[in-house]
Amino acid sequence: MSADTDQTRPRANTASVTKAVVPAAGLGTRFLPATKATPKEMLPIVDKPAIQYVVEEAVEAGLHDLLMITGRSKRSIEDHFDRAYELEEALAAKGEEGKLRSVRESSDLAQVHYVRQGEPRGLGHAVLCAEAHVGDNPFAVLLGDDLIESADLLRRMIEVRENHGGSVVALMEVEPEQVSLYGCAAVETTGEDDVVTVTDLVEKPSPEQAPSRWAIIGRYVCDPAVFPVLHRTPPGRGGEIQLTDALKELARTSPEEGGGVRGVLLRGNRYDTGNKADYIRTVVEFACRRPDLADELLPWLRDFVEQQERARV
């Protein structure tokens, strides 16, 4: 093949990933009445809102340009990542330097932009709201319900994307009775132990219909080819536009057209703050890791558990 012909051949988009999208427009109905006026993303994990952990993860992975997809009654998210001059002045006047640093930390993390999703029409629609900001660039999507212990997973996903193009999803193996809570992937092995090729995706299947036990968790790296696919994706499960449905189509699309989907297998810890029991477990575990809380909290927990066990006898 001549050099001229080779230069005109369409190539996979392997541009660097520099932008992150954080959907945060959900209604949080599982946490009512707490979320009637407080966004679920602002519920604290000890003394830091869950959404800040997600932003910190993106920044640690090298993504400093973040777009939040918000909605009505989400103003407190914007306020949290903005400067609070009156509070800062009050803390400075009192000499409370530690608290002052913690308050400034969130506003100094990244360049955060905001756009509103007019109505909650699904994750796919939320991602579509990022189209003007992202443009023709690959981008990461981080869901606020999932807290990942480190940025290693996201860094690895970005690396896979930049090496191969296409889109990348994070996968976690779950028990058969849990597959109906997730989008599940049919996968094929590759030459890399932690990377698989995704051949099909099913949104929240029954255990009998699930193609595997590999579930998609809330981290994605998407090729911009996802946008035209989402535009023509009809509402799916729950009457919402599902990102899973668009990725399913991209899995069957050629790399030259932005297609191909790979999965990176989770090797670290993931915390689901999207339901009450897991949220409470997350708060307890994070608190027990804190040097300023563990010495007081762990003995109390042991006594409390013993009391509960005795009460059950």
Image (cartoon, rainbow, N blue to C red):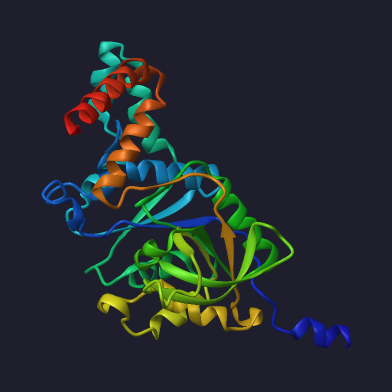
User: In which quadrant will I find the C terminus?
Assistant: top left
In this picture, residue 29 sits left or right of residue 178: left
Is the residue 51 above or below the residue 265 in the image?
above
Would residue 154 be seen by someone viewing this image from the given angle?
yes
Q: Residue furthest right?
A: 2
Q: Quadrant of residue 189?
A: bottom right
Kindly identify the residue that appears in the image at 27 percent across and 33 percent down.
Answer: 84
Tell me what residue is drawn at x 34 percent, y 39 percent.
282
Q: Position of residue 208 (x, y in %)?
A: 41, 76
Q: Position of residue 144 (x, y in %)?
A: 36, 52
Q: Position of residue 252 (x, y in %)?
A: 57, 83
**Looking at the image, residue 203 lies above or below residue 175:** below
Q: Nearer the viewer, residue 226 or 114?
A: 226
Q: Please state the horizontal and vertical placement of residue 310, each as a whole percent of the image.
A: 21, 27
| Residue 78 appears anywhere in the view | no
Residue 251 to residue 88: above or below: below
- Which quarter of the rendered picture does the N terminus lie within? bottom right
> Which residue is pictured at 62% across the width and 53% down the height?
156
Q: Residue at x 81, y 83 (%)?
A: 6
User: Going by the picture, which residue comes out furthest to the top?
Assistant: 95
Q: Relative to 297, is 20 on the left or the right?
A: right
